[in-house]
Image (cartoon, grey):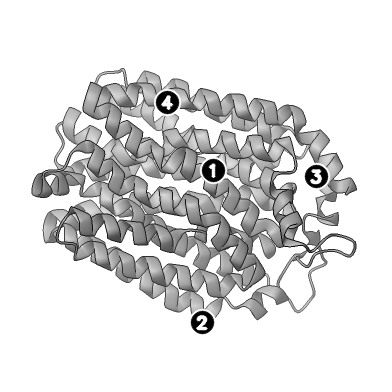
C-alpha cells in the first residue's frame, strides 16, 4: 500500500524505546484536547447570548454574524504565519502563549460596554486562537504513529464541536442565571487553568523524547523556507483538499452559529433551552467527526483513495439531510434528520487532515494544518455565519438555513477531483 511507506519522508516512524512511556502521548493528547475545548468554548459562547445582545444593544442579524465571523477572519489570516513561526521556533511555548492570549481576550468580552468594544475583543480572541488547532494537532501527531492520523485528526478536532457544545450550553445556562458577562468570564477562567497545566506538563524536551517521527529535514532536502512553504501547494491534491474542506466547513460553521437562534425563533424556545437543544446537536457532530476519522483510517488500509471517497460521501450526505431537515415541521422527526446531517457535516476533517499531512514533511505539519485551517476559516468559518446572517435579513433565517447546505456540493466536487490525483501525487512525494 502507498501509505505504508509515508514514514520515509512525511514523518519517519522510529522504534519506540523501552524507556518511553506509553501513557505520556495520551497525556499530551488530553491536554491539547482540553485547550481545543477552551478555544471553542471561548469562541462559541457568543452564540448562546445572541438573543441577549440583540435585545440589549439593538443589533441586526448581520452585526451578530460579524461578531461570530470576525474570529474566523483572524484565525484564517494569522493561522499560517503563526504555525510557521511555531514550526521554526517552539511549538509547546507557542501553544501556551496562544491560550493565554485568547483567555485574556475572552475576559475582555465580558467587560465590553458597547458593540465596538465587543467587536474589538472578539478580534483579539481570533488573534489568540490563530494557529492553535494546527500546532496542537502537530504536537499530537508527533507522538503517535502515522497510521492513526485520520483518527487523531478527527478526535482532536471534535473537541471544537464539543467545545462549541459546552460554550453554547454552559454559556446559555450561566447567562440566563448570572448574565451574559459572567458567561464570558467563566470561559476565560477555564482556559487560564488549562494554560497552567500545559505549561508544566507539555515541554519541548519531553515531547521530543516521545516523538514517533523524525522532524528534522532529511539530508538532500532543501531547508530554504520559500521551498518548504512551496511544498504546501506543490500538488493538485493538496490544493483541492484545502478547497473542499473549507467549503464543507462553510455549512458546518453556519449551522453551529445559527442553530440556537433558529430554535428560539421557529420552535419558540427560551434562549437557555434553545442553547441546550443546540448543544445536543453539536455533541452528535463531535461524535460524528471522531467516528468518521476512525472509519477513514480503517477503510484506507486497503485503498489510499478511500479516505477521499469517504469525504465525498460525507459532503453529499450532510447536504441532503440538512436540506430535508430544514424543510420539515418542528417535531421529533425533524430533529432526527437534522442530527443525521450534523453527524456528517464536519466528517471531512479527518480525511482532509490526514491527506494534508501525508503529502508534506513532518517538520511542516503545523504549517500544512494551518494552511488547511486557513482554507477552513476563509472559505467556511468567516463567511458561513456572516453570509447566513445577511441572507436571514432578506429571506428569513429559516430560508437561509434551507439553502446554505448546497455549498457542500462544491466541497464534494473538489474532493472528487482530489481523489483522481491523490495516488499519483503520493507516489511522486515518496519518490522525492
Secondary structure of the residue carrying tag 3 is helix
1 vs 3, front mark: 1
Q: Is any part of residue 84 visible from this angle?
A: yes
Which of the two discs, 2 and 4, sits closer to the camera? 4
Left/right placement of residue 306 relative to residue 104 reads right
The residue that label 1 is drawn on is 375
Q: Nearer the viewer, mark 4 or mark 1?
A: 1
Asked if the residue at tag 2 contacts the one at tag 3, i.e. Cβ–Cβ closer than 8 Å, the answer is no
Q: Earlier in the sequence, mark 1 or mark 3?
A: 3
Q: Is residue 126 above or below residue 189?
A: above
Quarter residue 80 falls in? bottom right
Residue at image mark 4: 405
Q: Describe the element under mark 1 as helix, strand or loop.
A: helix
Tag 2 secondary structure? helix
- 369 to 144, vertically: above or below: above
- Which mark lies nearer to you, 1 or 2? 1
Amino acid at each position: 500500500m502507498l501509505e505504508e511507506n509515508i514514514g520515509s519522508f512525511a514523518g519517519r516512524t522510529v522504534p519506540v524505546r523501552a524507556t518511553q512511556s506509553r501513557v505520556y502521548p495520551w497525556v499530551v493528547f488530553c491536554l491539547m484536547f482540553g485547550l481545543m475545548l477552551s478555544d471553542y468554548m471561548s469562541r462559541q459562547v457568543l452564540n448562546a447570548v445572541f438573543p441577549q445582545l440583540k435585545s440589549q444593544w439593538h443589533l441586526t442579524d448581520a452585526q451578530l454574524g460579524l461578531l461570530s465571523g470576525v474570529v474566523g477572519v483572524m484565525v484564517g489570516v494569522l493561522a499560517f504565519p503563526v504555525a510557521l513561526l511555531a514550526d521554526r521556533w517552539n511549538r509547546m511555548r507557542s501553544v501556551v502563549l496562544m491560550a493565554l492570549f485568547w483567555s485574556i481576550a475572552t475576559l475582555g468580552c465580558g467587560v465590553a460596554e458597547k458593540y465596538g468594544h465587543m467587536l474589538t475583543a472578539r478580534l483579539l480572541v481570533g488573534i489568540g486562537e490563530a494557529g492553535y488547532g494546527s500546532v496542537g494537532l502537530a504536537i499530537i501527531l508527533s507522538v503517535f504513529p502515522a497510521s492513526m492520523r485520520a483518527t487523531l485528526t478527527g478526535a482532536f478536532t471534535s473537541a471544537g464541536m464539543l467545545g462549541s457544545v459546552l460554550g453554547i450550553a454552559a454559556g446559555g445556562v450561566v447567562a440566563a442565571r448570572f448574565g451574559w458577562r459572567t458567561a464570558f468570564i467563566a470561559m476565560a477562567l477555564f482556559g487560564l487553568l488549562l494554560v497552567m497545566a500545559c505549561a508544566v506538563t507539555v515541554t519541548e524536551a519531553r515531547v521530543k523524547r516521545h516523538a514517533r517521527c523524525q522532524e528534522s529535514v532529511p539530508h538532500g532536502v532543501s531547508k530554504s523556507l520559500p521551498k518548504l512553504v512551496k511544498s504546501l501547494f506543490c500538488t493538485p491534491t493538496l490544493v483541492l483538499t484545502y478547497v473542499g474542506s473549507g467549503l464543507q466547513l462553510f455549512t458546518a460553521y453556519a449551522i453551529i452559529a445559527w442553530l440556537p437562534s433558529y430554535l428560539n425563533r421557529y420552535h419558540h424556545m427560551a434562549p437557555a433551552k434553545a442553547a441546550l437543544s443546540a448543544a445536543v446537536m453539536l455533541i452528535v457532530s463531535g461524535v460524528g467527526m471522531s467516528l468518521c476519522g476512525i472509519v477513514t483510517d480503517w477503510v484506507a488500509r486497503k485503498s489510499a483513495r478511500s479516505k477521499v471517497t469517504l469525504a465525498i460521501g460525507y459532503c453529499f450526505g450532510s447536504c441532503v439531510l440538512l436540506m430535508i431537515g430544514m424543510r420539515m415541521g418542528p417535531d421529533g422527526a425533524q430533529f432526527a434528520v437534522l442530527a443525521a446531517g450534523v453527524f456528517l457535516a464536519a466528517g471531512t476533517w479527518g480525511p482532509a487532515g490526514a491527506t494534508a499531512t501525508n503529502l508534506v514533511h513532518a517538520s511542516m505539519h503545523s504549517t500544512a494544518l494551518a494552511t488547511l485551517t486557513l482554507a477552513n476559516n476563509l472559505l467556511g468559518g468567516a463567511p458561513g455565519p456572516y453570509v447566513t446572517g445577511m441572507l436571514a435579513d432578506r429571506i428569513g433565517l429559516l430560508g437561509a438555513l434551507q439553502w446554505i447546505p448546497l455549498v457542500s456540493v462544491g466541497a464534494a466536487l473538489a474532493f472528487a477531483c482530489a481523489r483522481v490525483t491523490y495516488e499519483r501525487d503520493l507516489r511522486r512525494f515518496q519518490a522525492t
